[in-house]
Amino acid sequence: MADDARLLTAVPGVGPTALATLLGELPELGKLDRRKIASLAGLAPHARESGTSRGTRRIWGGGRKVRQALYIAAL
């Protein structure tokens, strides 16, 4: 976990709050690929499709706290 913390703090905008949220809410970080992590964080667009009906792609699911922490870090 210390290695993950060191890597995350090297990212601009990731402070102690975002670091604690990411490490606490995403224990899979560093073990899964980027697409699965994005889906777990609630940042990957998912299609709303069934049969012939086509919907729009929207982000949903995942961790609300993670999404909020990353939004604040991006500001």
Image (cartoon, rainbow, N blue to C red):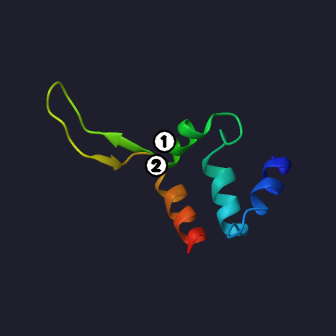
- Residue, x 18% and y 36% (percent of image)? 54
Mark count: 2
Which three-letter amino acid code belongs to the residue tagged 1?
A: Ser
Identify whether 75 is placed above or below 32. Answer: below
Q: Report helix, strand or loop for mark 2.
A: loop
Structural distance between the alpha carbons of marks 1 and 2? 5 Å
- Quadrant of res 11: bottom right
CB under 8 Å between callouts 1 and 2? yes
Please state which of residues 57 and 40 is positioned toward the viewer in this rendering. Answer: 57
Q: Position of residue 75 (x, y in %)?
A: 56, 75
Q: Report helix, strand or loop for mark 1.
A: helix
Q: Is residue 49 left or right of residue 46?
A: left
Q: Position of residue 14 (x, y in %)?
A: 69, 66
| Residue found at the very far left of the displayed protein | 52
Which three-letter amino acid code belongs to the residue tagged 2?
A: Gly
Q: Position of residue 19 (x, y in %)?
A: 70, 61
Graded by Cα atoms within 10 Å as few (under 14), some (14 to 19) or many (20 or more), the crowding at tag 2 reads many
Residue 51: numbered disc = none
| Residue found at the very far bottom of the displayed protein | 75
Graded by Cα atoms within 10 Å as few (under 14), some (14 to 19) or many (20 or more), the crowding at tag 1 reads some
Residue 42: numbered disc = 2
- Quadrant of res 49: top left
Q: Position of residue 58 (x, y in %)?
A: 32, 49
- Residue, x 64% and y 34% (percent of image)? 32
- Residue, x 36% and y 40% (percent of image)? 46
Residue 39: numbered disc = 1
- Residue, x 46% and y 49% (percent of image)? 42
Identify whether 22 is placed above or below 16. Answer: above
